[in-house]
Image (cartoon, rainbow, N blue to C red):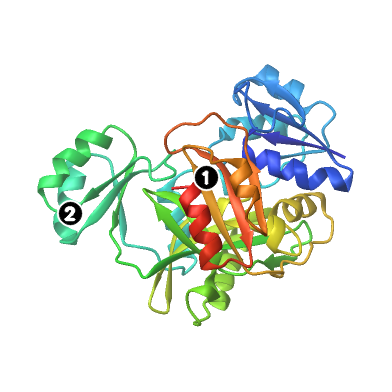
Amino acid sequence: MRIGFLGGGQLARMMALAGYPLGLQFRCLDANLESPAADLMEHIQAPLSDKDALKKFSQGLDLVTIESENIPVKSLEELIQQGMNLHPGIKALSTSQDRLFEKTMFQQLGIPTAAFGNISSQKDLDEQFKNRQSACILKTRRDGYDGKGQFRIKTQADVDAAWSSLGGRDLILEQWLSFDAECSLIAVRDLHKNVKFYPLIHNVHKEGILFTSEPWTAVSNQSLQAKAEDYATRVLNELDYVGVLTIEFFVIKDELIANEMAPRVHNSGHWTIEAAATSQFENHLRAIMGWPLGSTALRENFQMINIIGTMPSTIELAKIEDLHLHDYRKRPAAKRKLGHITVLKPSPDKLNRILHLCP
């Protein structure tokens, strides 16, 4: 079976690495000549919106999947017109691409979110901020990730600066939440509507970028797993979803507040390669092909650490026991995710050595 990836980043790379042992073949479409997946599979270098490239890309494929939510919906529509099997579907993609649509869906499904409102003018921003009488965060409705496209508003004096920074685009104003922690739930649903969940993960961000992930039980004995699974099930059923989907939550006492979802394999699930019975990448492929889903059980305690901006010494990392390095083969740049580390059986000594190498 040959599977096509819309996008050739590190997620496509890791899905391919999970799929080759299963006898699968892959192709990606990406405009970047140096895409992380390009050296692992046939790579068609072209914009995702290029109709001729999409036609060439689809020839001989059995199905297509995505590795980013920032893919033109028109590209998916073009592939469907060509008769391609595509998972996840357009509804999931279009909903996740717009923060207003996403949060509206959450609320319609009875999933708590921060208070929010659509912003189409500076007058809207002025009025909504005054009405909330508390700190807020102004965000672009589309294209924001890793802390980009956001401006925190603490006082009325910040409103003009926020509008100057982000005005002129579709925006959403959200109430700023003082949360206890951040977590994410990775779910997978197959063609036959079978669903499995990975253990809830505790995430720590640095400057808006995910830095570390570890099992939620390492942080708190209070179980929120059942509540997270209930919320995720509502979303999966609403979208008639097929594949891996991740929801990120804020934790406030014993409540989960939905922040956003990702209709794809997710950074907070990279640990599953070594520490789960079946990785999120393999389970995504199983789901979209209609194969039985693999176990999502945790095999070993872990901590996952993102490598951001600069690659550390591979030789020095190799000296640390139970450490697994994943180099995405990307050019170093500020705030760019260049790879990740998963360390099994983490100890304070191991983590201190890693953090010294990955400041």
Badge 2: residue crowd in 10 Å (few <14, some 14–19, many ≥20): some
Residue 59 is left or right of residue 242, and the answer is: right
**Looking at the picture, how far across and down is residue 133, in whole percent?**
15, 61
Most foreground residue, 319 or 312: 319
Residue 278 in view, yes or no = yes
In the displayed structure, 75 sits above or below 33; it is below
Residue 39 is left or right of residue 354, and the answer is: right
- For image coordinates 43% across by 45% down, the residue present is 146
Identify the residue position indicated by label 1 in the image: 307
Cα–Cα span, label 1 and label 2: 31 Å
Tell me which corner region of the image, top left, top right, bottom left or bottom right, holds residue 217. Answer: bottom right
Q: Secondary structure at mark 1?
A: strand
Identify the residue position indicated by label 2 in the image: 154
- For image coordinates 29% across by 66% down, the residue present is 178
**Looking at the picture, how far across and down is residue 248, in whole percent?**
49, 59
Task: Inspect the image, locate mark 1, and give the three-letter code of the amino acid beneath it.
Answer: Ile
**Looking at the picture, how far across and down is residue 350, in whole percent?**
56, 61
Most foreground residue, 20 or 67: 20
Task: Inspect the image, locate mark 2, and give the three-letter code of the amino acid beneath it.
Answer: Lys
Most foreground residue, 138 or 209: 209
Residue 130 is left or right of residue 241, and the answer is: left
Q: Which mark is residue 280?
A: none
